[in-house]
Structures are given as C-alpha cells and as structure tokens.
C-alpha cells in the first residue's frame, strides 16, 4: 500500500518542526513544493508509515506530487516522512500525477492508505535478517526476532542484558532519551552498576560480520 497525505488550504506557520514558513495547497504549486508542504507533520502511526514506500500528496482533490519514503521522523505527537520526489519517468509518478485522490472513503482524515498497482514491482526486497529470502516488508514473519537473537549471540555472548546496557550507553552518548526504569517499582536496579565498556556498533559489525544462516 501507499500513504496519501491530503493538503489543506494554504496558510503561514510559525515554529514549524520542519522549518517551513507556510503549509497547505496553492494553485500552480510545483511537485517539489507540494512534497515539502505535504510530507508532514501528521498525526499518524509511525510503525505503519515506516512500512510504506510511496507517498501521494493531494491538493484540491488531485495528486500534486509522488515521493519515495526513506524514513519517518517523530515530531512530538506527529510524524513526517523523509524522502525524495519522484521524477518524470518513474512508473508510479507517471501513473498518478494529476490524477484524482485514490483514497475514496467517507473519512475526512488527511492521512489515508491505498493500493497502487504500479508499486508492486518495487515492494519486493530481501528480508532484513540477511537470510536471502524475498519479502514485501522489512522482515519475513519472525525473522526480526531471529536477527536480534543472532546479533545478541554473536556480539554479546548471548546476553540480552549486555545488549540493553550497550544500547543505553550508546543512547546516552548521543543524547537520546532513555527509558526511566525508576518509574516502574517492579524493576530492581543497581545504582552503583557501571555500564560495560562495549565497542561502537560499527566496530562490532566489522569484527563479527558473517552471513546470516538460511532458514
């Protein structure tokens, strides 16, 4: 499926999380302008968005831009997609640019999902676990767990605890918010515990990288 973002009326904005001075649709906007205006920030499910490859930007009932999604960023209680506008010649773009909104339902929500026949050829890709099998998602069912367990076994001697400590350490070094386990009285912690001295992830990979086993 693809995601559809429906633009509202043109309006100026302040303190925009994407650094824009205005959002919304205006006549004769270019495909690039439509993408900048329509890629966020929306109230939508991040996990579902992350599974989509293409986004349609709708203005005045018609497709103004088609983009390929490369990532999803969270901005407070909203999300925005990262990616690039598809150029003329791409089959998904050429099939839908200027066409009517493909999401036909009674909902007024600006975020919707639809099947595009032209995207089928782009959805198949190797499973993210490295098994070599083909999937239409990042992982085949259960293979995300397999990939996690394999890395814990190879890089952390099978200890999920050591992996979690390493994640917390890397997160702290990069200023990322960490789970406050003190808010859960059922979790016991050792305030004097020192985090393990683990190498950065890329160094671990360079030392231990081996092909994933086939299913």
Image (cartoon, rainbow, N blue to C red):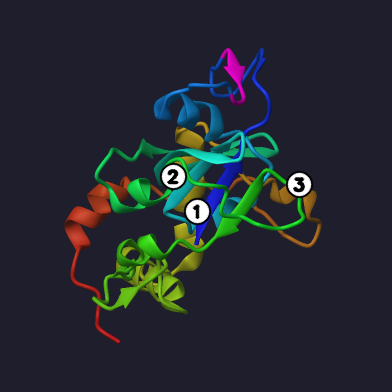
In this rendering, position of residue 21 left or right of residue 208: right
- Which residue was labeled with disc 1? 50
Image coords of residue 5 (percent x, y): 59, 42
Give the x, y percent position of residue 102: 56, 54
Instruction: State whether residue 60 appears in this view.
Output: yes
Residues shaded magenta = 21-25
Quadrant in which the C terminus is drawn: bottom left
Mark pair 1, 3: CA separation? 22 Å
| Picture residue at 31% right of the left edge, 61% below the top | 122
Q: Give the spatial CA distance, label 2 vs label 3.
A: 25 Å
Foreground of the two, 36 or 78: 36
Membership of 166 in magenta stretch: no
Left or right: where does residue 44 sit relative to residue 135? right
The local secondary structure at tag 2 comes to strand
**Which quadrant of the figure has residue 106?**
bottom right
Q: Which residue is mark 3?
A: 108
Q: Counting residues from the N terminus, which is met first, the one under dot 1 or under dot 2?
A: 1
Please give the residue where the numbered disc 2 appears in the rendered image.
Answer: 71
């Amino acid at each position: 499926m693809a995601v559809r973002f429906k633009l509202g009326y043109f309006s100026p904005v302040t303190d925009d999380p994407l650094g824009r001075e205005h959002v919304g649709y205006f006549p004769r906007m270019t495909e690039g302008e439509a993408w900048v205006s329509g890629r966020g920030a929306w109230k939508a499910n991040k996990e579902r968005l992350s599974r989509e490859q293409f986004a349609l930007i709708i203005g005045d009932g018609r497709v103004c831009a088609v983009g390929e999604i490369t990532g999803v960023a969270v901005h407070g209680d909203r999300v925005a997609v990262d990616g690039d506008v598809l150029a003329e010649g791409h089959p998904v773009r050429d099939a839908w640019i200027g066409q009517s909104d493909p999401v036909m339902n009674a909902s007024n929500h600006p975020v919707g999902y639809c099947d595009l026949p032209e995207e089928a050829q782009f959805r198949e890709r190797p499973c993210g676990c490295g098994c070599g099998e083909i999937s239409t998602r990042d992982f085949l069912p259960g293979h995300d767990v397999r990939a996690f367990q394999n890395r814990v076994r190879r890089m952390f001697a099978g200890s999920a605890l050591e992996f979690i400590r390493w994640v917390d350490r890397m997160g702290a070094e990069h200023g990322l918010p960490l789970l406050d386990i003190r808010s859960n009285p059922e979790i016991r912690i050792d305030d004097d515990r020192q985090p393990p001295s683990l190498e950065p992830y890329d160094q671990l990979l360079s030392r231990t990288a081996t092909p994933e086993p086939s299913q």
